[in-house]
Amino acid sequence: MRRTTSTRISLLKRVKDPDDAAAWREFHALYAPLLFRYARARGLSPTDAEEVRDQCLETLARKMATFNYDRDRGRFRNWLRRMVNNKVAALPRARREKSADSSETRGLPDPRPAPDELWDRQWRYHHIKHCIERMKEAVSERNYRAFCLLLFDGCSVAEVCARLGMNANQVYVAKSRVLQHIRQNLGELGFEGE
């Protein structure tokens, strides 16, 4: 099983063109929430996390026109992780740690994972979330609702059938179709086999 979490190379090539608005919308939809949530998970306030996100996006907008993907030099995700970590580190220490340094938590071990582990979790989470959002456009509303009831709400097949007026076979087919679209989108983003 090949396990990779690389960025879709075609998207990186498309955002080299500052006039490709669709590519930039997709790029922003994928990476802006990732950068914000990662900064928040590193202990930043919402305002500081927004500042870090915006600084990273500004840097990306400047650098993507000349960015050349070279797998031998490293992955895009590693470059992006270094950038966001540098932006977090550049904030004054008091702003970085004010939420993590309350009187209740002083002296306790930090329950947050290491920054690299945290980044990898956030990277996977946001790519999967992005694929689920894209999947909404590819399947019927009823199939999407059946999938959400099963996966997110923890409903049984019988409950989904009762709520949506479907039979069990229709629910299983809906789930299969939705998962097929999600897997296809994940494959396009480099998550084959996950």
Image: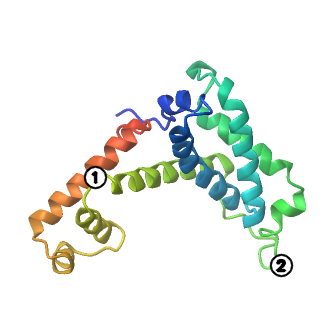
Question: Which residue is identified by label 1?
Answer: 179
Task: Please determine whether, in this image, residue 107 is positioned above or below residue 19.
Answer: below
Left or right of 178 in this view: 75 = right
Graded by Cα atoms within 10 Å as few (under 14), some (14 to 19) or many (20 or more), the crowding at tag 2 reads few
Graded by Cα atoms within 10 Å as few (under 14), some (14 to 19) or many (20 or more), the crowding at tag 1 reads some
Q: Which of these two is toward me, 134 or 176?
A: 134
Label 2 secondary element: loop
For the residues labelled 1 and 2, the Cα–Cα distance comes to 45 Å
Q: In which quadrant is the N terminus drawn?
A: top left
> Residue 157, how many percent across, how many down?
18, 72
Task: Please determine whether, in this image, residue 139 is positioned above or below residue 185.
Answer: below
Left or right of 121 in this view: 64 = right
Which label number is shown at residue 103?
2
Q: Which of these two is toward me, 105 or 162?
A: 162
Residue at the spot 88% in from the left edge and 57% down from the top edge: 93
Left or right of 34 in this view: 56 = right
> Residue 136, how many percent across, how many down?
34, 57
The numbered mark, 1 or 2, whose residue comes first in the sequence reads 2
